[in-house]
Image (tube, grey):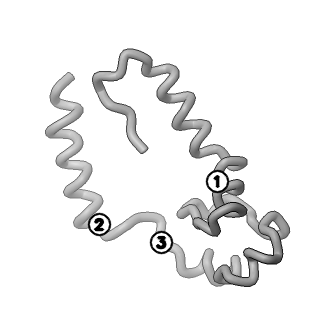
């Protein structure tokens, strides 16, 4: 998810991103697709239908094994590129 520096509606863009990242949307995504979020502060216990939950890694195991970010080299390179190509253009 990103907001381009050239957007003419930054407030609307920020509201949309906030909506997409809200707890309710993340839980709905999990319920419908079984797609986990990297956020560890969302409790999914008793919120996922049994027909889907049986296919998921148990929540305690998922929390203990999830890492908050991808490989540091990739993340750092992406951040550097973003700063060079997007932020510097303003």
Q: Give me the C-alpha separation between circle 1 and circle 2.
A: 24 Å
Q: Position of residue 60 (x, y in %)?
A: 69, 80
Residue 50 versus residue 20 in the image, above or below: below
Residue 80 versus residue 85 in the image, above or below: below
Residue 72's tag is 2
Q: Residues within 10 Å of mark 1 (few under 14, many from 20)?
A: some
Whichever of callouts 3 and 1 sits on the residue coming sooner in the sequence is 1
Q: Position of residue 80 (x, y in %)?
A: 19, 48
Q: Give me the C-alpha separation between circle 2 and circle 3.
A: 11 Å
Question: Is 83 on the left or on the right of 45, as rendered?
Answer: left
Q: Position of residue 31 (x, y in %)?
A: 72, 62
From the viewer's perspective, is the residue at label 3 or at label 1 nearer?
1
Q: Secondary structure at mark 2?
A: helix
Pick out the residue farthest to the top. Answer: 8
Question: Is 71 on the left or on the right of 59, as rendered?
Answer: left
Give the residue pinned by disc 1: 26
Q: Secondary structure at mark 3?
A: loop
Q: Residues within 10 Å of mark 2 (few under 14, many from 20)?
A: few
Question: Is 19 on the left or on the right of 9, as rendered?
Answer: right
Q: Give me the C-alpha separation between circle 3 and circle 1.
A: 17 Å
Q: Are marks 2 and 3 in contact (CB under 8 Å)?
A: no
Q: Are marks 3 and 1 in contact (CB under 8 Å)?
A: no
Q: Position of residue 11 (x, y in %)?
A: 50, 20
Q: Residue at x 70, y 56 (%)?
A: 27
Dividing the picture into quadrants, the one containing residue 3 is: top left
Q: Residue at x 64, y 57 (%)?
A: 29
Residue 11 versus residue 22 in the image, above or below: above
Q: Quadrant of the N terminus?
A: top left
Q: Are marks 1 and 2 in contact (CB under 8 Å)?
A: no
Dividing the picture into quadrants, the one containing residue 87 is: top left
Whichever of callouts 1 and 2 sits on the residue coming sooner in the sequence is 1
Residue 67's tag is 3
């Amino acid at each position: 998810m990103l907001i381009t520096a050239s957007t003419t509606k930054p407030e609307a863009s920020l509201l949309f991103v906030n909506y997409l990242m809200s707890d309710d949307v993340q839980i709905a995504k999990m319920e419908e697709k079984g797609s986990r979020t990297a956020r560890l502060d969302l409790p999914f216990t008793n919120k996922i239908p049994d027909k889907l939950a049986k296919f998921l890694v148990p929540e305690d195991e998922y929390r203990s094994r999830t890492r908050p970010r991808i490989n540091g080299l990739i993340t750092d390179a992406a951040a550097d590129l973003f700063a060079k190509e997007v932020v510097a253009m303003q």
